[in-house]
Amino acid sequence: MTAATFLAPGSFVRHPHRPDWGRGRVQSVIGNRVTVNFEGAGKVVIMTDRVALEADDGESGAKAAAKD
C-alpha cells in the first residue's frame, strides 16, 4: 500500500512526528497534497512524499480511554 492509498476525504489520520496534533480528518487529496484538519493544529497541508501519514481507525484512542 502506498502512503496515499488509504487517504480519502473523511478518513482519519495521525502525523507520525507530531503526536501533539492529535487525530486529523482528511479534508481533500490532490496529488501528493493532503489537507488535514487536526484536533490540536487545525488545517494543515501535508506533502505525502515527505510525510507518511498514519491511518487512525480510532482503536488506539478508544483503548487508551478504556484503560483510564
Image: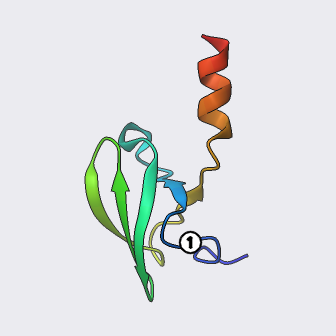
Type of amino acid under label 1: Leu
Q: Give the percent coordinates (x, y) of residue 1.
A: 73, 75
Task: Give the residue furthest to the top.
Answer: 68
Give the residue pinned by disc 1: 7
Which residue is pictured at 44% across the width and 40% down the height?
19
Residue 66 image offset from top left, x and y in percent: 66, 17
Q: Quadrant of the C terminus?
A: top right
Left-right relation of 65 to 31: right
Residue 55: percent from the left, percent from the top? 61, 57
- The image position of residue 21, as x and y in percent, is 36, 43
Residue 52 location, quadrant = bottom right
Q: Is residue 54 above or below residue 5?
A: above
At x 34%, y 57%, the residue is 37
Mark 1 falls on what kind of element?
loop
Q: Is residue 59 above or below residue 43?
A: above
Would you identify the image quadrant in which residue 60 lies? top right
Quadrant of residue 6 within the rendered picture: bottom right
What is the basis of the colouring in this image?
rainbow
Q: Could you tell me which residue is drawn at 59 percent across and 20 percent down? A: 65
In this orientation, which residue lies closer to the viewer: 5 or 62? 62
